[in-house]
Amino acid sequence: MNPETPLRQVRGVGPARARALAAAGLETVLDLLRHVPFRWEDRREVVPVAAAVAGRAATFRGRISEIRRIRTRRRGFSLVRALLADGSGAIPVVWFNQPYLFQQLRDGDEYLLHGAVRERTTEKPAGRELVSPTCESLDRALHGARIAPIYPSLGPGLGPAMLRRLIETVLDDFAPASVPEPLPAELLERHGLPPLGEALLALHRPEGGVELLNERRSPAHGRLIYEELLRLQVSLALLRARETAAPRTLVYRVDDGLRSVVRGLLPFRLTAAQRRVLGEIVADLQGPHPMLRLLQGDVGSGKTLVAALALVVAMESGFQGAFMAPTELLAEQHYATLERLLGDRYRLGLLLGGRSGRGMDAAGLRQRLAAGDIQLAVGTHALIQEGVEFRRLGLAVVDEQHRFGVRQRALLRRKGEATEQPDLLVMTATPIPRTLALTAWGDLAVSTLDELPPGRTPVATELFPARRRHAVYQRVGEELAAGGRVFVVVPLIEETGGSAVASLAEAEERVRAELPGWPCAVLHGRLPAAERARVMQAFAAGEVRVLLATTVVEVGVDVPEAACMVIESAERFGLAQLHQLRGRVGRGARPSRCFALHGRLTAEARRRLAVFARTNDGFEIAEEDLQIRGPGDVLGTRQAGLPALRCARLPEDWAWLERARDDARELLARLPAAEIEALSGMAADAAAAVLNP
Ligand code: ADP
Ligand code: MG
């Protein structure tokens, strides 16, 4: 059967099924064959029932009788029982939650069953039983005594059994050599991989190697994983090449004059890491193409200062700068920091949503920005909205990039003139695990601040069950008595029957009761900007000593005098988020502590909190987070605009990812554009949409 044949021409596929398959993304025979099994059962050896061993899976062949449906008291829970007998003896069989089997199984018919045997303990009589085996009527058994592929369901009407039947039909008339090979032969040779047709056949009708198959280590697996990752890497390399292919039009002035300006502005000596990273950025700014660089550094590593100095380079060269933050609170903070650092020499403006801060009216601000009078615009998404024009945007800095989609980045970039691509520096305090950086960013240029400014003390983190809250707050009280300032962070959750605001008010009451007499203020995202600014100022000035906050304090808030944090219901936060929260303390010379109070813990939450308490290293935390949550969640591949992975899994397939990246680079350098496009596997406009939506 031709791989390009539409599925509706396959025997057994009517219009309705064809539609269901199409809805699952399968149009052709090849699409169907690319839907590969996720598990293989070795049914080559049929075991006599008498020889069944508890604790092991095996294949049996016999007649089924005494089929009973057992009603249970637990709702939504069902049992079907039967007896399986062959020449050697009989064994009870039980299926959990497959009530339809009661209708399907026919008393006295012969079946092939594959499943785990266990010693039963609750049921009388004691003995072995076969638990939820797969079950095939022998006269219909497609796989007889061989290795049976088990397929992931594609939805109603496209369950494992149906898929298997369809794929068998297709394979009955299938020549592996008829499948066009999308990968260059030399790459297959380099990695010792089979051609596509052969790989597919080996997965659907394996001859052996069940263990390798189930561990995804067969050559056929390697082949599909590699292909998928190569396509991804080629797409990324292509996009990046396109984005940075534009010749540089903005010329920056980097000379002694600039150096002395920078020296004059510096509030402290740069760390060695800051100096190195600034050098990397300046080199980009003088390079032949617009910059697209990711600056990653743990919380408190001093990214803002590096960004500010890069912006100075732009402004001294006569360009405007933009600094975009994900939340209003953070934008306000950055504005205050940058104003303090740069305000004597440059004109700054703050743009927040409809309103704007510090007495500037938004319309006036936009006008001054368009006229070039404002040299540095700090703000939120407001910066990339319709109607915001720069006269000559040079460098755009995006803080906490993981909260910005690719789309926002592209929009910011467009604020430059049509012929001028501004330079782009994206920053993140959630270090992107090596694995993900490579997946999501391909070979995006990355700078890393791997050193904290001097005088930092690691935060000592301790976990406490909620019932010890009182003891914890006593220690917090001592910290306050010694002159300290304290963050109390609460998750904002809608308690049953109450509202988020009510749960915050309740938390406030509790904190005030625990810390009587200490000036306390509440900070959350729904406060008006002016009120938020006032609260932050009061806390920074020490008029407020206890700041009760939601996760709005997660990023960027910088009050070095605060050396103590309580996180309430810590189990409700993700690992990366906990680390961000904790990053608000440990910023001054004072030894800092973080108390994480928690309720009942799931195994996963326990692991998360244990990692949190054990390490202060953002990179280690990022890797652990990836292990615990999986890559999709950590980065949100969908948000990043990248295709989801079907076969490949990360970080398990890391080695393949590296090979794919290296090969992609090489291919891009030597294959003609049309072949690259074909390989990228994304339609040209879909690819363009990733970086230029
Ligand atoms: P990040 O954004 O990377 O989390 P910040 O830029 O907010 O970190 O910097 C954290 C704190 O460290 C700020 O108070 C900042 O003023 C201070 N800082 C930055 N660089 C240095 C340095 N080289 N020496 C001393 N303090 C620094
Ligand atoms: Mg920051």
Image (cartoon, helix red, strand yellow):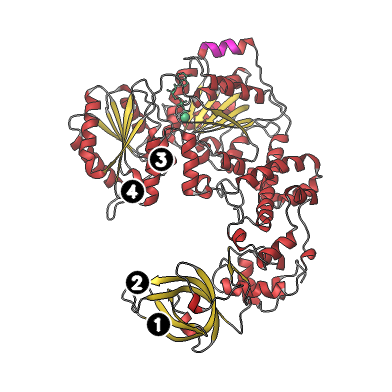
- Tell me the crowding category of disc 4: few under 14, some 14 to 19, or many 20 or more residues within 10 angstroms, Cα based: some
- Identified by mark 4, the residue type is Ile
Between the residue at mark 2 and the residue at mark 1, the CA separation in whole angstroms equals 20 Å
In the depicted structure, whether residue 338 falls above or below residue 690: above
Q: Which residue is mark 4?
A: 493
Between the residue at mark 4 and the residue at mark 1, the CA separation in whole angstroms equals 43 Å
- Identified by mark 3, the residue type is Val
Of the numbered discs 1 and 3, the one sitting upstream in the chain is 1
The boundaries of the magenta stretch are 259-264
- Identified by mark 2, the residue type is Thr
User: Residue at (51%, 37%) from the top-left corner?
Assistant: 382
Between the residue at mark 4 and the residue at mark 2, the CA separation in whole angstroms equals 43 Å
Of the numbered discs 4 and 1, the one sitting upstream in the chain is 1
Q: Which residue is mark 3?
A: 611
In the depicted structure, whether residue 64 falls above or below residue 654: below
Between the residue at mark 1 and the residue at mark 3, the CA separation in whole angstroms equals 47 Å
Of the numbered discs 3 and 4, the one sitting upstream in the chain is 4
Secondary element under disc 2, as helix, strand or loop, is loop
Q: Which residue is mark 1?
A: 69
Q: Which residue is mark 2?
A: 121
Of the numbered discs 3 and 2, the one sitting upstream in the chain is 2
